[in-house]
Image: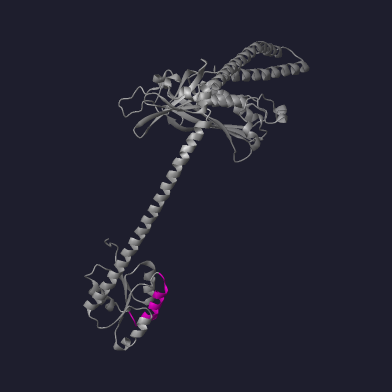
Amino acid sequence: MEYTDPINILLVDDHPENLLALEAVLAEENYNLVRANSGEEALRCLLKQEFAVIVMDVQMPGMDGFETARFIKARDRSKDIPIIFITATSKEAEHFFTGYSVGAIDYMVKPFIPQTLKSKIEGFVNLFISSKKLQKQAKLLEEQTKKLEKANKELLLTTLSLTRAEAQARMIGETSIDAMFTFDAQGTILTVNPAAISMFGYTEDELVGENVTLLIPDLRALENKERNGEGEGRYVTGKISEMKLRNKQGSSFPAEIQIGEAYIGSDRLFACTVSDITERKKAEQELLAAKEAAEIASRVKSEFLATMSHEIRTPLNGVIGVTDLLMQTDLNPEQRELTEIIRKSGDALLAVINDILDFSKIESGKMELEEEPFELRSCLEETFNLFMAHKKQLEMEYRVDPELPQYLLGDVTRLRQILMNLVGNAVKFTEQGGVYVYANKLGEEDGRLEIEFVVKDTGIGIAESKRSQLFQPFSQLDSSMTRKYGGTGLGLAICKKLVELMGGSIRIESGDGPGAVFIFTVKVCPFDLTDMKRSY
């Protein structure tokens, strides 16, 4: 085992020229020489690196060599490092005993013979390398021992697992509600579980030894039709197939069949699981019938709502029209007041019917969007003009992103309906302050623009606990609020449906101040009016 790690040697002397002399002696060797100008610095070096030998002067200012050696030998990490003291005078040579007593391995007097120092250091280095090799060998031996122990443990567990697996397989087969049986490459039944006996009505003696076609007559239908070679499976492993099977009494039942295959030695064996799905098929039929009944009921409901809305709206339009004519005649103040009440009530009822008609069309999937060129700014202006003359005298303001094109291609009627609903709600629930609408460009992809509309007001706002009820059909946040402000609870639900039909989404966010902030997005196409075509 070759040792390839660097060999560090620590040279400690307070005179730089002595350190240079030591380095010159050891320069030819492949050592990593580390300098230290004092005992304190030597201790710091020992905290960072591991050293094979320490060559140290005795007389140094501050902490001398003896005191430094005592600290080195007091630490577990450095106590085994050989220390060679080098002294400059014969007087210091009289203190050999002191040097050895603090843990020195050798003691040399200057001037020393370079070859002698090199030989001693080489010997200590060889000892260091041998020690490291022994440590590595001991570590490898310990790792190999652990691997062997682990392998023995795994072998024991594998043996135990095989015994358990055999017991578990037998228990599963005996307790399973599905029929299980095995057969060989010739189709001879080898084993059957109790469920197979119960499902097919045969005894175990009547099945074992017979051909598997007794239980699955159309076995060839389960074979792997795409098999190209002998190495490939005869059956598609894991595939679940449905077919009709018969029991001993001749009664048929729907079943799910799954076949697996394996080699045990040189024998090719197959395992088959059969599940009786009679109850599941019955439940599926009942579920399908219930689904069809629900669809019919939903369609009838939608058609009824649409028909009734049309039938009610026709005479109501007559009532509103006659009321308009009546208001143009000479009426006294009391008659005019009563006529205005009739007109307002008719308008309110017509709005309710229109909401129900729109919602029923969306629910029945009959709502279709139109694509026609329109000007976004004109759409916002027309919406705002309906509310500008409101008696509350609110501040009404809208802003269009300058990056948006002047003309767009989409369903302006439905976009205006969404805006009128949100702006109308904002005006209805705002007593002072204003209503603000912002149209911003979010992005463009595949020739379609995504536009974000922000409708903000300074009204009474919506409590956090009530927001989960928004956008639900016929949902009223507060009965007292409904009595005060009116409403069907369909407006926001229709807005949500229309926004989704236009490829967007709608949500409510908390604003910086009072009021509510509704944000919705739609996707439309830019339109070049000069070329009368889409610009991509």
Residue nearest the viewer, comparing 472 with 62: 62
Assess whether residue 443 is covered by the magenta stretch. Answer: no
Residue nearest the viewer, comparing 26 with 122: 122
For the point 70% across and 31% down, the residue is 478
Quarter of the picture containing the C terminus is top left
Tell me residue 416's x, y (percent): 56, 23
Assess whether residue 67 is covered by the magenta stretch. Answer: yes
Vertically, is 343 above or below 405?
above
Number of numbered callouts drawn: 0
Viewer can see residue 529 = no
Q: Quadrant of residue 365?
A: top right
For the point 37% across and 67% down, the residue is 48
What color scheme is it?
A: one colour
Left or right of 228 in this view: 76: right
Task: Looking at this view, name the residue that lies furthest to the front.
Answer: 205
Residue nearest the viewer, comparing 181 with 340: 181
Left or right of 381 in this view: 150: left
Vertically, is 479 above or below 365?
below
Tell me residue 102's x, y (percent): 38, 80
What residue range appears in magenta?
57-76
Tell me residue 257's x, y (percent): 46, 24
Q: Quadrant of residue 362?
A: top right
Viewer can see residue 511 = yes
For the point 72% across and 18% down, the residue is 340
For the point 31% across and 86% down, the residue is 93
